[in-house]
Image (cartoon, rainbow, N blue to C red):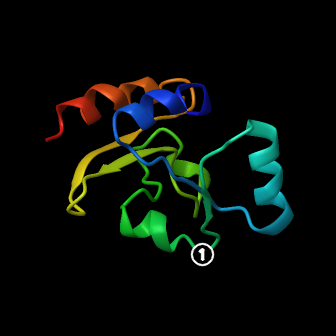
């Protein structure tokens, strides 16, 4: 995500990461990744539940318990979900989001 942040900015997108970590652990994630975009701390899984990104038995990491699945959700300016993907290689395949963003009105 961070490597392509300029492309997301150019597409008019605001990138927000969501982590189950809190406090120092969340700060370490930001430091380790070099993220310049906001990281939302969601230890109670409220946001990931709202976007229906909880693990399921048939999903790639489905047997891991009460954790959110890795992936992305694209929400347009009117609050509508335009795309939602489960993606184990999320950080490496974030490029999938750019064509979706460019197709949005």
Q: Is residue 100 left or right of residue 47?
A: left
In this orientation, which residue lies closer to the viewer: 42 or 35?
Answer: 35
In this orientation, which residue lies closer to the viewer: 52 or 95?
Answer: 95
Circle 1 residue: 44
**Residue 54 falls in which quadrant of the image?**
bottom left
For numbered disc 1, what is the local secondary structure? loop
- Please provide percent x and percent y for residue 70: 52, 44
Q: In this view, does 79 lie to the left or right of 56?
A: left
Q: Which residue is drawn at 18% across and 31% down?
A: 103
Q: Which residue is drawn at 34% across and 34% down?
A: 11
**Residue 24 falls in which quadrant of the image?**
bottom right
In this orientation, which residue lies closer to the viewer: 4 or 28?
Answer: 4
- Please provide percent x and percent y for residue 74: 33, 47
Q: Is residue 49 left or right of residue 23?
A: left
So how many labels did they put on this image? 1
Q: Classify the position of the N terminus by image quarter.
A: top right
In this orientation, which residue lies closer to the viewer: 31 or 60?
Answer: 31
């Amino acid at each position: 995500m961070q490597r392509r942040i300029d492309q997301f900015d150019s597409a008019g997108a605001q990138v927000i990461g969501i982590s189950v970590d809190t406090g120092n652990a969340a700060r370490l994630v930001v430091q380790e990744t070099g993220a310049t975009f906001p990281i939302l701390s969601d230890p109670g899984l409220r946001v990931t539940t709202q976007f229906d990104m909880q693990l399921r038995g048939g999903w790639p990491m489905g047997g891991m318990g009460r954790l959110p699945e890795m992936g992305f959700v694209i929400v347009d300016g009117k609050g509508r979900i335009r795309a939602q993907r489960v993606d184990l290689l999320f950080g490496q395949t974030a490029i999938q989001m750019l064509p979706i963003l460019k197709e949005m009105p």
